[in-house]
Amino acid sequence: MPAYKNNLEVLIKQDSKQGIGLIDHEQTETFNQWKFRGGLISIYEENSVYYESNNPQANKKYLLKVTKQINQYEIMLHVIQPTFIVVKDIKSANGSQYPIIANSIIRLGRVEYRVIEERNKEMQITYAETRNQDQLQQNDTNKVYQCRFCFMEGIQSKDQLFLTNICRCVGNSQAVHLDCMRYWVDSNITREETQFGLSLKWNKSHECSICKESLPVRVQYENEYFDLFTLERPELQYILIENVNKEKNVYGEIYLIHALLQDNIKLGRGLQCDIKAQDITVSRHHATIKLSKDNYFVIEDNRSKFGTLVSINQICQIDCVACSLQIGKLLINLIQSDYILKGAPSTQHKLTQLPQISKQLEEDEPQMDDDSFQLENK
Ligand SMILES: [Zn+2]
Ligand SMILES: [Zn+2]
């Protein structure tokens, strides 16, 4: 049941440091802050100052609008940047966890993963959207292609797909059979069975050997999706996660996580982690993926320094007591509370919950646990 209270407090914190939207969640007390209260709020920005107005402000930058729906608040964001929910700040009946589904982007520090496929508990498969350049052109003109690997000629068809526009190569060297490409890609992948499913790790860059453009892991033709690698799916609920990190020296990784996982999955920089991310901005044990009680794959933060972030849509419903959103260098805390209403019962004691919630947030603030972690491991 969603948490719903009469008042929503919106607290905007802005990191004044130059940076790439990496917010140190231990240091947010020094940030510039703006506080808004009410059930219906429109917030504008003017020269990095935020204020509220219920009349349209033509010459101001619109940031967000809060509206009351039946029993929950709806937040509409007017930003073009990707928006993330800060997993550890979620306060709900289920604790601090967030579901990860097809198209979810997961950020641990600078490292980014994307859920590229999901089979839910009803066994329905959803694929993440492909980029425009990964959608193969349909062949209207019966154009004959020659595969640059096997030299066989043919026209584009579902049974014999040619990859035609996935890199910068043009002319005779552009086309290659999907099957030929897959055979070559598979030879560059190390597969390993894990406690949660399977990991596929590329041994070198996943790029075109001629033009060096990085290749997609999947293409779309008509309404079907085709992988450039071989992976047999289990007859189980699962998610497929791709490491989409653009850092140098990080080769492609894909993880198949199925519902028969033996244990919660640890993500982080430490040796004991199931999914390792070798980046200084990732904590040793940064986050955990598990199957929730109601059978969703969810992620939890493990007191990480830079937080565990999951992408959200521009319109989202707030169905928890408190949470925060991160947009670039902005942190937007949303906390539900009650007004003191004359004669209304029990608001007095409920009001006192508000400071408790913020105190709780403080107590949950991570200590930089890396050192203690080392000691623990000794
Ligand atoms: Zn071929
Ligand atoms: Zn190429």
Image (cartoon, rainbow, N blue to C red):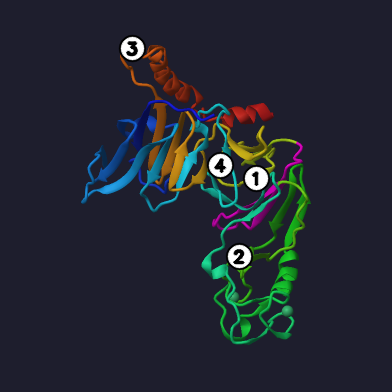
Mark 2 or 3, nearer chain start: 2
Mark 1 or 3, nearer chain start: 1
Disc 1 to disc 3: CB gap under 8 Å: no
Q: Nearer the viewer, mark 4 or mark 2?
A: 2
Tally the marks: 4
Q: CA distance from mark 1 to mark 3?
A: 56 Å
Kindly identify which numbered label has been placed on residue 282: 4
Kindly identify which numbered label has been placed on residue 276: 1
Question: What segment is highlighted magenta in the picture?
Answer: 238-262
- Give the side of residue 106 with respect to residue 259, left or right: left
> Residue 281 placed where, x, y %?
52, 43
Q: Residue at x 58, y 85 (%)?
A: 171
Above or below — where is 184 with respect to 127?
below
Q: Residue at x 64, y 63 (%)?
A: 217
Kindly tell me whether residue 229 is visible in this rendering.
yes
Q: Nearer the viewer, mark 1 or mark 2?
A: 2
Mark 3 or 4, nearer chain start: 4
Any magenta on residue 253?
yes
Mark 1 or 4, nearer chain start: 1
Kindly tell me whether residue 206 is visible in this rendering.
no
Q: Amino acid at mark 1?
A: Lys
Q: Quadrant of the N terminus?
A: top right
- Give the side of residue 320 with respect to residue 351, left or right: right
Q: CA distance from mark 4 to mark 2?
A: 25 Å
Mark 4 or 2, nearer chain start: 2
- Give the side of residue 213 with respect to residue 76, left or right: right
Residue tagged 2: 216
Above or below — where is 113 with respect to 265?
below
Q: CA distance from mark 2 to mark 3?
A: 62 Å
Q: Amino acid at mark 4?
A: Val
Q: Nearer the viewer, mark 2 or mark 3?
A: 3
